[in-house]
Amino acid sequence: MKKNIAILATNGFEESELSSPKAYLEEQGWNADIISLKSGTIKSWKDGNWSKEYNVDVVLDQANEADYDALVLPGGVINPDLLRREEAAVNFVRSFFESKKPVAAICHGPQILVDADVLQGRKVTSFFSVKNDLINAGAQWEDSEVVVDNGLVTSRNPNDLPAFNKKMVEEIKEGKHERQRV
């Protein structure tokens, strides 16, 4: 069954944390749209420098959670911080939890989950520097390659991408998770 996956990102995303999940999703025969704040392209970050630009498929104000089966949130230091400042981005993320759909966030990506107020009592992991932010938002943080909690998939960094991609696809194949919550 063909799936449509939303990848929410803006300038400063960690390149591998968008390109690897997107390619893995497309290998499943699924569509993976890059959704961003503005049309055109967004610039990736790699090895401490700006890198390639990626085409935006859908502008956030035209995106609708109902059109997607799951959400992917790449990290990077800049990307999640810019997204969490935008109410529309926070609401878009929260809508996937309200609809009980899988959400996958890696590295710094889980930061927007703090603003979406969806972490209370959830088991997660992330890049170590955002650990306290997630704990303060009510999450139970652990230092693991990948953590799955009722449709929420999180990983620590680009080294975890193989495990992250595999678990992300498993959760998407399972579909809605009735225990996914806001």
Image: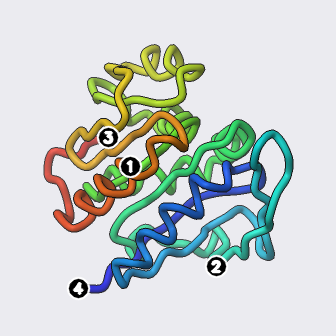
SS under mark 3: loop
Q: Earlier in the sequence, mark 3 or mark 1?
A: 1
Mark 4–mark 3 contact, CB under 8 Å? no
Residue displayed at 27% across by 24% down: 121
Q: Earlier in the sequence, mark 1 or mark 4?
A: 4
Distance between the alpha carbons at the discs numbered 2 and 3: 27 Å
Distance between the alpha carbons at the discs numbered 2 and 1: 23 Å
**For the residue marked with disc 1, what is the amino acid?**
Phe
Q: Which label sits in the foreground, 2 or 1?
A: 1
Mark 3–mark 1 contact, CB under 8 Å? no
Where, quadrant-wise, is the N terminus in this rendering?
bottom left
**For the residue marked with disc 2, what is the amino acid?**
Asp
Looking at the image, which residue sits at the far right? 50
Residue of label 3: 182
Residue 57: numbered disc = 2
Q: Badge 4 local density, few (<14 within 10 Å), some, or many (20+)? A: few
SS under mark 4: loop
Q: Of 104 and 122, which appears nearest the observer? A: 104
| Relative height, residue 47 to residue 95 (above, below) | above
Residue of label 1: 164
Q: Badge 1 local density, few (<14 within 10 Å), some, or many (20+)? A: many
Percent of width and height locating residue 7: 53, 63
Q: Earlier in the sequence, mark 2 or mark 1?
A: 2
Side of 175 where 46 appears, left or right: right
Distance between the alpha carbons at the discs numbered 1 and 4: 21 Å
Distance between the alpha carbons at the discs numbered 3 and 1: 22 Å
Percent of width and height locating residue 97: 33, 50
